[in-house]
Amino acid sequence: MHTDPDTSELMIDSLLRRCTTELKGNSPSARLDVELLLGHILRKTRVELISAGKDLVTPASAALFTNLVHRRQAGIPVAQLVGSREFWSLNLTVTAETLIPRPETEILVECALTHIPKDQPADFLDLGTGCGAVALAVASERPNTHVTATDISDQALTIAQYNAAALGLNHVELQCGSWLQPVAGRKFSMIAANPPYVSNMEYIAHHFELQHEPALALKGGEDGLDCIKHIITAAPKHLFKDGWLAIEHGYRQGSAVEILLREAGFRSIFAYSDLQGHARVTEGKLSG
């Protein structure tokens, strides 16, 4: 295939190579980022982009793509640039008002599903739901479970409601308020939470990566444990006998969370590790 120099610059593989090089200094996943961004513009999967590498992109589409790459260089997350993130095989809308679901949070879903029966009614509570990732993942796997989700942000709950409607998950109840306050007087068989757990120093150190996500969903105080302590202390009166609480936390916080759970009366404490072998989700069963 013969193309003039200007036209060759508009080929898919040329655009991907050039923008990957430009982005390398700002993102550890530069190649993946540019593939996702160009795929978003062209409405193609990553596999389709590779197989169509010699196809030409229109100048208008190339300009849109380049603009997205420049915004990514400024630190804006890919999920916000394309308006969505896949989580538990669900396509979820995300905005600057919601935390972007991380792969580690799927461990929290796996943990919750372990304790929620498939074919029996149950009550599950997701604290700090954000875009609804954990609540909607559980709802998609457990249609007989009544799922309740809380968040202090009205904007985040609006996105969660949109995602629930888009996925046809109608057995999800959304409540606005701080942690367990909206469910006063109610009890659940399982509570899960992905609270803010980034310490003040970590937030400063990683400000470039985190600056475009809501600080309210990230900052957990001096040691990152402020919200975790509150949830563990308040959860027992909202759990049925032998009910479970599962908390996602930072990779250095596993031991501290285990101690907090034990002091609050939880037993059968177990930590789930991520792919690097770090404890990321710790669960406990409320002692009878």
Image (spheres, rainbow, N blue to C red):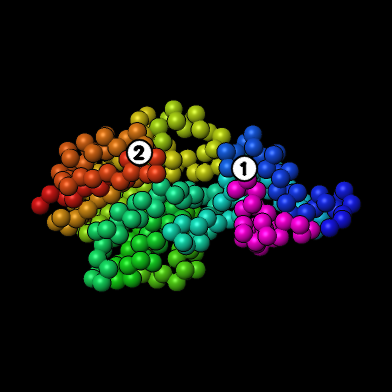
The x and y percentages for residue 39 are: 65, 57
Residue found at the far right of this picture: 4
- Residue highlighted by disc 2: 278
Mark 1 secondary-structure assignment: helix
Residue 139 lies, with reference to residue 216, above or below; the image says below
Please tell me how crowded label 1 is: few (under 14), some (14-19), or many (20+) other residues with Cα within 10 Å.
many
Q: Which residues are magenta?
A: 31-56
Q: Magenta stretch containing residue 54, yes or no?
A: yes
- Residue highlighted by disc 1: 30
Q: Amino acid at mark 2?
A: His
Whole-number angstrom distance, CA of label 1 to CA of label 2: 25 Å
Q: Quadrant of residue 43?
A: bottom right
The x and y percentages for residue 57 are: 77, 57
Mark 2 secondary-structure assignment: loop
Q: Magenta stretch containing residue 55, yes or no?
A: yes
| Comes first in the chain, label 1 or label 2 | 1
Residue found at the far front of this picture: 1
Q: Amino acid at mark 1?
A: Ala
| Residue 185 visible, this orientation | no
Tell me which residue sits at (39%, 66%) in the image.
140
The secondary structure that most of the magenta stretch takes on is helix
